[in-house]
Image (cartoon, grey):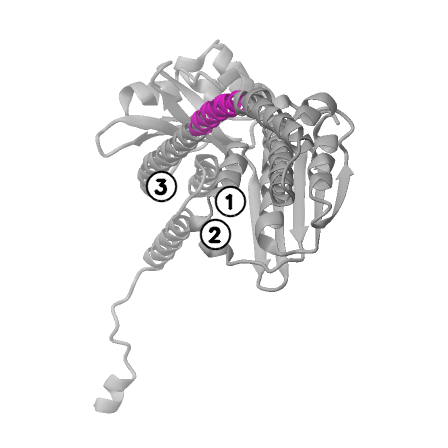
Amino acid sequence: MSDLLSNIDVRPRIPPESEAQLATDLAGMRRLNELNQRLIGPISLEQALKEILTLAIEFSEADRGNIQLFMANTNSLHIAAHQGHSLAFLDHFKYQGCDAVCEAALRAKQRVIIDDILLAPSLQGTMDQKMISADGIRAVQSTPLVTRRGDVIGMISTHFPEPHLSTPEQFRFLDLLAFFAAETIERTKAENALRESEQKLREFNNTLERQVKDRTAELRLLEEKRQQEIFWAIVDTQEIERKRIAENLHNSLGQILYGARLGLSQVLQSELFAADKENLKNVDKLLNAAITESRRISHELIPVVLEDFGLKTAVEDICRQYSDRIKFRYRFTGLNKRLDKYIEIAIYRIVQELVMNIVKHSGAKEAMVAVEIKKAHLLVLVQDTGDGFDAEKENGNGIGLKTIRNRVKLLNGNINMVSNAGQGTVTNIDIPIVTDI
């Protein structure tokens, strides 16, 4: 008995038509799932609608179709994706759907089916019928895309070349696809709107940053201009005061010293004891040295050579003044024309201060001064072979170097000073200038 039962198939029998339906359902669900996987993540609305339309045509067993989106501002349907239609068809229905089919489905918020275009009373004698027939279409269905809120946001229409009676199974999957399409459209629109909003925000932030940067640059330029104006005012004041002091040295103290020396020379011509005469001669030497020194100081205070002949000659003159103590070499490149008055005065005073430092403190036997104009930059090199110094300490304590650094800074320039014990000092200065040289 058990052997007999073992040969009997006790599984429930599924009718062949049910097995076919189950296979169709599985295939349909698989296609929907595949579509869902493809549309996950960032995707353009146009690409999403093309993917959805392809599957709608497949589910309907149609040969062409289109998806329209509802435009609230014009209260009409606009074709957003299409497949298989002629240009004439698309031109006719691009911004206004067929009144008897998709527009009717929009008004009713439910599917509209026409099994045969030629027999439909609502289409008889209309231009829509002529355009649809000319496109080789005999049957059509339009299914609204309805959101969870109940709003119609679009339409899926599929078209058939022959009179067609759709099956409930086809509509079941088409309804699932329509729901999925509505969700996808809303999500994609929201994502695109968010991306556009983020892009606008980024553009706004970039614009704001540029405006802040531009305004900051403007304020910086204004501040630099203000500082330069103050600097030029200080230079003017200093030069005026230097000139006043120089004139006093020359016209007042110089004349007094010269007068004293004349008086002393008369005394020397009278009869004096030898010792007294020798002492007076020493005094005469001191007076002569004082007169020479006052003239030198006066000359330093008023750079007449600079005013008359320019920076090159004035710098050469500085070097020649001290050539009896230090062997100076100098080189000039590009100084073919006069520079701005304030630039020349500033560079002259900077070189003068650096040369004086070399003479007084370096113990050098040789030094070099080079001035060059290159690509709208004025470059100054001052180098000596002296004892060197601690540049870091001098930055904090050296009044002369502080003055030089401040002048360079107010000229929007850069200064680099390198000094090593026993190896001398090298000073490089780079100042931007406006010149046609």
Q: Nearer the viewer, mark 1 or mark 3?
A: 1
Q: Amino acid at mark 1?
A: Leu
Quarter of the figure that contains the C terminus: top right
Q: Secondary structure at mark 2?
A: helix
Q: Residue at x 28, y 66 (%)?
A: 13
Circle nearer the N terminus (1, 3):
3
Q: Which residue is mark 1?
A: 401
Q: Looking at this view, is 261 or 383 the one in front?
A: 261
Q: Looking at this view, is 273 or 314 the one in front?
A: 273
Residue 39 drawn in magenta: no
Residue 229 drawn in magenta: yes
Q: Is residue 133 visible?
A: no
Tell me: 334 left or right of 351.
right
Quarter of the figure that contains the N terminus: bottom left
Return the x and y of residue 131 as percentages of the image width and height. Answer: 54, 17
Circle nearer the N terminus (1, 2):
2
Q: Secondary structure at mark 1?
A: helix
The part of the chain drawn in magenta is 216-241
Q: Amino acid at mark 3?
A: Leu
Q: Are marks 1 and 2 in contact (CB under 8 Å)?
A: yes
Task: Please tell me the numbered disc located at residue 394.
Answer: 2
Tell me: 129 left or right of 27.
right
Q: Label 1 to label 2, Cα distance in Å?
A: 7 Å
